[in-house]
Amino acid sequence: MPTDEQNNNRKKNTDQQEVTENGCMIKTKKSRTVNESEINRTENRNHEKQKCKSFWCVSITTFCCILNLIGGIFLIKYSLYDFFMEDRLQMRPGMPAYEFWKEPEPEVIVKIRVFNITNGDAFLNGTDSTIKLDEVGPIVYREILRHSDVIFNENSTLSYTATKILVFKDERNRPGILNETIVVPNMAALGIASYLSNAGFLVNLGAKALMSNADEEPLRKITIYDYLWNYKSDVLSMAKTLGGSILVPVENMGVLYNIYKNYSDKLNVKIGPKYESGEFFQLLSYNYGTTVPGFKLDHGHCNASILGATEGAIYPQFLDKNSTLYYWRKTLCRPARLYFEEEVQKGPLLGYKFVLKNNVYDHSNDETTIDCYKGNPDTLPDGLSDLSKCFHNFPVAASKPHFYGRSGDWVEKLQGLHPNRTLHDSYIIVEPTMGTPIDQCARSQSNLVIKTIHRVYPEKMKRFSNSIIPMFWIEIHQPDLTPLIIGVIHFTINILPTLEKFLGPLMIIFSVSILVLLMKKIIRKREKSEKEKFELL
């Protein structure tokens, strides 16, 4: 039998076990209470976060809807299209109109075709009575145009420097074309003889002596490269030695050299709200003057004004079929007017085609009309425009290539000309709303004008008296625009006017709808919250 002491120990152990178990139960209950408290606190924090998030979400949505609503009202009251077109007149840096103009991306291709005389000996000895010509080329270059030194003047004008350079296009020329030889009029010998046509006997005798010493012939065999870029003559070097740079301002008569040497010009044009869209980018001055370079009013020269012309990069806005484009090109030595001919669809853009009239180089018989390009002292035949003032008084004249659209007695002395409108006429296809040229092609021919050659010169020189001999013709063609420019124009003139008719009302309807839905959601949430509070009570 267990003793009393053993029973007491067993009871004690049992009590301790119960205490231990009760202790575990107590710990478990405390642990459950702590976990529930933490869960409640976490739920409260999440609830507060959700409440805060919901507040900001509602606030931002409301703010955006109000802005959208204001924007919709603005679009109904004001035209975004009109705003863009008016802002374009400002030529703001960073905006498309300015950036597209400052560094033009559309490729401009320059093609030169020179006239080779194929029967030189037969003409000089009198066997042939006409000069036979063969067109050689094209010699293809790319013209790169950059605008720099841009100044926005307070009088709502823009001043800048326009620089042009030529880059030979190897891939578009036949191999070795610049090394090919041609026979051309000796510009130095015939030019001097023509220039001195009205001078006295002794002056012409001296010129003849120079030519004899230099062994100059009326025709010259030369490479195409030298003809274009490095045409030099011993008679010019001698004349410059005797008379200085005043008598002979240039020794290099390369035709492209003289066009593109120092081709960096200062222009001032109209911009901004002071002038209407129809005057946008019209010239106010060219190389600080208002006349074609070479015409000096203080020397009593004709007022060959360039006012109102454009350089061809941008034309006035909102053109119509009665508009006239007044185009200035340095190689032409004059502004020329182009008139509307037809509408032309170029991709997504509708263009207006403007062309030169056939009588563009004709001379008026009206004594009250000032004609600065008729030639001096003798009037040139119709179809020819005097270039001498732009090229150191050298006797040259411009015409349409192959004398397209005009012919006269001088053409009867020439063979090998085949005038063709498609190949030889000039045109500009312009997007009429923005005045951006989509496709433009300027073509002109330079001709040596040989007046009556004095009797002191040899007979083979006098064979060229009273002749107009084609030297070369040049085509400057911008065939298209870049996809980016086309896209901007298409969006601005075709999409935006239609879009803004519907965009404003849609923005208002959308904003009001979202605000109404938002208000309903807030009301439902508030009602639900009040209902939950009531149930707890």
Image (cartoon, grey):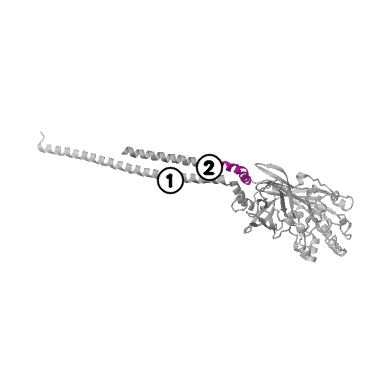
Query: Which residue position holds label 2?
Result: 507
Q: Is residue 489 visible?
A: yes
Q: Secondary structure at mark 1?
A: helix
Q: Quadrant of residue 293?
A: bottom right
Classify residue 70 as left or right of residue 340: left
**Residue 20 percent coordinates (x, y):** 21, 40
- Locate the N terminus and report the quarter of the image it occupies: top left
**Amino acid at the residue labelled 1:** Trp
Residue that appears at 81% across and 47% down? 417
Front one among 245 and 99: 99
Query: Which residue position holds label 1?
Result: 56
Classify residue 101 as left or right of residue 444: left
**Residue 530 percent coordinates (x, y):** 36, 40
Residue 320 drawn above or below residue 245: above
Q: Secondary structure at mark 2?
A: helix
**Residue 380 percent coordinates (x, y):** 82, 54
Front one among 280 and 275: 275
